[in-house]
Image (cartoon, rainbow, N blue to C red):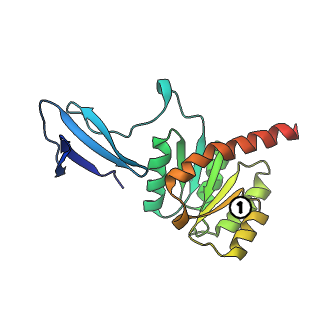
Amino acid sequence: MKPNIMISRGGKSLGSGAAQMIDSRLVLLQWFPDHAGVALERAWFPLSRPARLKGGAEPDIHVLMIEDDSAIAEMYRLQLEHDGFRVTVATTGEVAFSTLSGSEPDVVLLDLLLPDRSGFEVLAALNERFPNHPPVVILTNYGEPSMIDRGRSLGAVEYLVKSRVTPGEVSERIPMWVEQRRRRGQGDS
């Protein structure tokens, strides 16, 4: 999924599609989920994803999103990368385990409906295989109280229903979840 690109001149939309030169410069508006539009001026260069990272530094927080729906994964990836996080998307539980073995993320966003196993099975296996795994936030379409209780009993730090939260709201909470883990880790030592 690519961001929606609109050509604009003096506040008047010229439509989407091919870029046009306007007053010797190219003016593009790029839509992001929590913004009305970010004005970017480019001279014949393709529009790229902006990042809010200062000084070109690498992102400090790595997010692993375990989500098999490509549209949802892309929506969250765009928002999180825009907000300065490094994002890895795993489409199955097995891919998630490989990612965790390779480089440990700081937080995991976990869907419950995956093609190879349930999110609950993934969380239980995480507890077994990686005892000091990063905080897990369940991000799903299911909000039944019994499922919320099961997720929390397996150690999820948060249980969010996709229809009740925006990618921007999830992005805002990520530093809090990471900080909670860091404080918990300091208390254990």
**What residue occupies the far front of the structure in this picture?**
11
Rendering coords of residue 70 (x, y %): 45, 61
Which residue appears at 24% of the width and 41% of the height?
28
Mark 1 element type: helix
Q: How many numbered marks, from 0 up?
A: 1
Which residue appears at 61% of the width and 46% of the height?
174
Rendering coords of residue 6 (x, y %): 23, 48
Q: Up-down: is 116 above or below 59?
A: below
Three-letter amino acid code at the position of disc 1: Leu
Which residue appears at 59% of the width and 56% of the height?
95
Q: Is residue 188 left or right of residue 180?
A: right
Is residue 92 or residue 3 the one in the foreground? Answer: 3
Which residue appears at 50% of the width and 51% of the height?
168
Q: Is residue 25 visible?
A: yes
Is residue 11 or residue 65 the one in the foreground? Answer: 11
**What residue occupies the far right of the structure in this picture?**
189
Q: Is residue 135 left or right of residue 71?
A: right
Rendering coords of residue 186 (x, y %): 82, 37
Q: Residues within 10 Å of mark 1 (few under 14, many from 20)?
A: many
Q: Is residue 77 left or right of residue 188?
A: left
Q: Is residue 104 visible?
A: no
Q: Up-down: is 61 above or below 3?
A: above
Quarter residue 43 falls in: top left
Quarter residue 19 falls in: top left
| Quarter of the figure with the N terminus | bottom left
| Quarter of the figure with the C terminus | top right
**Residue under pointer 1:** 123
Is residue 127 or residue 147 the one in the foreground? Answer: 147
